[in-house]
Amino acid sequence: MAWEKFEMRWRRPRPRPIQVVALAGSVLAAGTVLMMFNRMSGFMGRTRAEPQLIATVDLRLGNTLLAADRGEAQARADIEAGLLQLQTFAPAEPQTRAEAAKTRQWKQRFGVTRLHKTEARTPVAEAYADGYNRVMLAEIERRHGRSALDELLHGQDRATTGEPRS
């Protein structure tokens, strides 16, 4: 009899069907939650993080079109101030007597000075000078006529390239 009492105490009762369904449902729910967390691991920081953007890049710095626009705007401002200038890149050698005489003649006859740019000749600097000169040449032609502009341009080409006038 003691043996029967002892045996009954350690014997497990058989689970009811509702308990089996509850156990299966909880295991299924736990598995679903774990799969969802596994899929969201990118949000949780488990994957390799993408590099952070450290600085911004200003694309306007090397843009030749914007440099030409800035040159045109500066030329308009100089015209408003009463200046007529043409921008050229300074040659490596000093100005000759003929070039100096031509520059004085431009200043006396047309009021035009030549501004020598000493900075490096880059595409952006060239675009700025081209935009500036485009507006200035149009203003010189408006004030002094086409013949004066042709004389200035022909003289400028001779002074900068050393070609004889034809």
Image: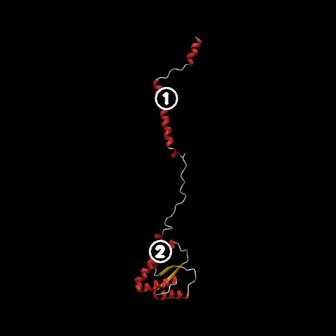
Rendered image: mark on residue 5? none
Tag 2 residue: 71
Q: How is the image coloured?
A: secondary structure
Which residue: 48% across, 40% down?
36
Image location (x, y in percent) of residue 2:
59, 12
Classify the position of the N terminus by image quarter.
Answer: top right
How many numbered tags mark residues here?
2
Regarding mark 2 in the picture, which secondary structure is present there?
helix
Image location (x, y in percent) of residue 130:
47, 76
Image location (x, y in percent) of residue 159:
51, 84
Which residue: 51% across, 72% down?
123
Image location (x, y in percent) of residue 41:
52, 44
Precedes in sequence: disc 1 or disc 2 = 1
Amino acid at the residue labelled 1: Leu
Amino acid at the residue labelled 2: Gly
Tag 1 residue: 23
Q: Is residue 129 above or below residue 17?
A: below
For the residues labelled 1 and 2, the Cα–Cα distance comes to 79 Å
Q: Residues within 10 Å of mark 2 (few under 14, many from 20)?
A: many
